Amino acid sequence: MKKLLALFVFSLLLPPVSAQLITLTVYPDGYVKVEYEITPSNYSTQVIVPILGEHYEDLVVEDENGNPLQFIVSNSSILIYPGNAKLVVASYYTPDLTSKKGVVWTLNVSLNSPFTVVLPKDSIIVDLSDIPLKIAENTIEMPPGNQSISYTLPHEEAKENRWVYLLLASVILAIVLGAHFMKGRGKSITREEFEKMLNGLDLTDEEKKALVYIFDRGGRCSQAEVREAIGIPKTTAWRMFKRLERKGLVRILKGKKENWVELKLGR
């Protein structure tokens, strides 16, 4: 009788089990959006999900209506308080789950539950660590465990050559700007000269607008200010700044409440 009572009390102390769906959406630049969809069990007061990777950005935790939920990040996990939510959706972005060797990308992840991977459009799968539970076009459902998926992107070699060109163009642009600065002993270039230099690079209209906006404000301002000025969503802006940083055009500065972005070209 005492053993039965002890088992009953122990079962009450265990956290309720929640059903969850895990989706990893892989972008062409290697960043991965990790998304959990969790249906809390009855009387569940807490939900815990792991953070994959050491670095993450744009962590959002919402209920089924898009309302924010309270959460705490601790020990590489997200502790969520679902309240009365019928569905909990937690998502973030990380660059730590993919690696690249030559033209082959590899996604590595370890999970205790089955998960779905959405690869970039037209990806070509070259290796799988295990037999997938389901596969359709660029969507793969993998079993639990330590799993890896290797893939290539179409015209990857052409893209690599394009990035080499962009890198060389950025270096040339920096040299040209440096020459202007030395010639004028600190005299800044004009807005028109700056725009003309940007036109020589392979940039989108949004990227050019963002760089010109930062230039007009002395070469440094918050990411939120740029985002609001050119009218783009937070996630789109975040990826744009990452692209510009990889091209060597800006430097991202971490702040306590928000990130700042600074022109590496100077003024």
Image: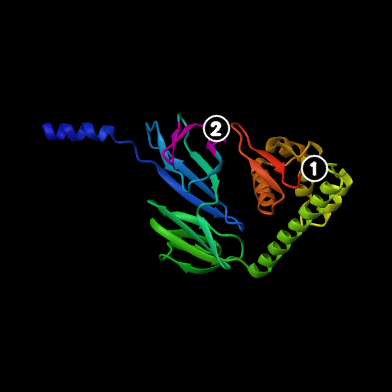
Q: Judging from the image, what secondary structure is the residue with disc 2 in? A: loop
Residue 144 in picture, x, y percent from top left: 38, 55
**Residue closer to the observer: 234 or 219:** 219
Q: Check contact, mark 2 vs mark 1: CB within 8 A.
A: no
Residue 29 in picture, x, y percent from top left: 61, 57
**Residue closer to the observer: 202 or 136:** 202
Mark yes or no: residue 205 visible.
yes
* Residue shown at 48% from the left, 55% from the top: 116
Q: Judging from the image, what secondary structure is the residue with disc 1 in? A: loop
For label 1, the residue is 267
Q: Is residue 192 left or right of residue 261?
A: right
Residue 124 in picture, x, y percent from top left: 56, 68
Which amino acid, by three-letter code, is at mark 2? Pro
For label 2, the residue is 68
Answer with mark 2 or mark 1, whichever residue precedes in sequence: 2
Q: Which residues are magenta?
A: 60-82
Mark yes or no: residue 143 visible.
no
Q: Residues within 10 Å of mark 2 (few under 14, many from 20)?
A: some
In this view, the residue farthest toward the left is: 1
Residue 150 in picture, x, y percent from top left: 50, 65
Q: Residues within 10 Å of mark 1 (few under 14, many from 20)?
A: some
| Residue 163 occupies quadrant | bottom right
- In the image, residue 61 lies in the stretch drawn in magenta: yes
